Structure formats: C-alpha cells, structure tokens
Image: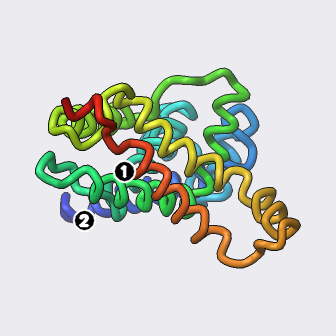
Amino acid sequence: MSKEKQTRNAEATKAVILEAAEKLFAEKGFAGTSVREISQKAGVSGPLIMFHFKSKDGVYKAVKAAIVDRYAGSKRPVLDVGIPASEFLREFVEAMFAFYRDNPSMLRLSKWDNLAGEQDPWPGEDEWHHMYEEYFLQAQARGEIRTDLTPMNIFSFITGSAHVWWEYHDHFLRHEENQGRGGEADARFLNELTGFVLRGLSPGPGDLE
C-alpha cells in the first residue's frame, strides 16, 4: 500500500472515530463516555483509537478542534479590515446564527464542560477570538463602531445571543406561539438581532469627534 493511501485511510479512520465520539460526548459528557463505547459506535478497535489519539482526553480535544475547524470551513465573514463594519457585522451575525443552528452538539458539549467546571478555550478558539478582536479594533479606529465597548464584549454579545437562542430554542418557540407569533420565529429573531447589533454598535456623536 502506498504511503499516500495509508495516510488517506488513517484520516478516514480518525474521522469515523471523531464522528462517533462527538455524538457520545454530546449525549453523555466526557465522564460518562468510555473508550469502549466510542470503539463500539465507530466500529474501530480501542487500541487503534489510542494509537491515533493517545487517550480519551485526546479524543475529546480532537472533537472540539474538529468543531472549531468546521467553523473555519463554514460560510463566515472575511476578516479583511477593508470591509465596512456594517457589512461585516451583518455577515458575522448571520454566520454565528447559522453555525449554532447547524452544530447542536457544540451546545451540548459546552453544557457538559460548564457542569464539569471546564472553562478553557477549545483548541483553535483563541486564534479566532484574537482575529475578531483585531477587526473590531480596526473598525473602532476608523470610526465605524462605537469606542466605549471592548472588542471581546462585542464578540460575546453576538455569539452569546446566537448561543442562547439555539440552546433554549424550543422554549422560545413555545413562548412565541403563546404570544400569537408562531410563524417565522427564527427569521424574526435573526432580523431583530441584526438590527440591534447594527444600531447598537453605531458610533455616537462623541465617537466622531
């Protein structure tokens, strides 16, 4: 077997392991999931899992890294300081809303981490934080975003809103139905969040002096 084919096979095996592990960790948490269960669900031997990831913790970190990589490959705003803040913010809100919607296991893993008192950033997460912070700093310097807010808080306002909407999605939908607003709740929330962000981050008179 060629080295290239061996590499492809190894990557395919790791992908199968990570897919199975993500489902189990999301369902049962890190402590409640065993390597044996991952092995059974993936159809891969336990020793082979240890060969690729060294430990259950290694599998867990790799699952988190894979989710962060999915964000890197998703439809998201281009981090270019030349893009006007209004355009960037609109695309950023839409991207985070869609990513949280499409990755429910990320929400469940975050819950399990919180229950375990785990607050460390996921692999690769800090790099994204720093890139967004830099964009917001540049936009503030150009006078496109109000300057009384820290860049990390701007990031947190947007991602936190998307997180909460999808984490408690069923509850919010029931509330909307009880209020007689049952249709298009997701689209309405996204539209209102986008407007809130664009208006809330617009520079005031003091920022333009």
Instruction: Look at the picture and state if 203 lies above or below 79.
Output: above
The one nearer the camera, 109 or 165, is 165
Task: Give the percent coordinates (x, y) of residue 8.
Answer: 29, 62
Task: Give the percent coordinates (x, y) of residue 154.
Answer: 41, 36
Residue at image point 82% right, 61% down: 175
Quadrant of residue 131 within the rendered picture: top left
Residue at image point 70% right, 25% down: 116
Task: Give the percent coordinates (x, y) of residue 43.
Answer: 60, 60
The one nearer the camera, 149 or 101, is 149
Residue 97 seen in the figure:
yes
The one nearer the camera, 119 or 55, is 119
Task: Give the residue type that dot 1 points to.
Answer: Asp
Q: Return the residue found at the far bottom.
A: 183
Q: Return the residue found at the far left.
A: 82
Label drawn at residue 69 = 1
Residue at image point 29% right, 35% down: 205
The one nearer the camera, 33 or 64, is 64
The residue pinned by badge 2 equals 5
* Image quarter of the N terminus: bottom left
Q: Earlier in the sequence, mark 1 or mark 2?
A: 2
Task: Give the residue type that dot 2 points to.
Answer: Lys
Distance from disc 1 to disc 2, alpha carbons, whole Å, reads 23 Å
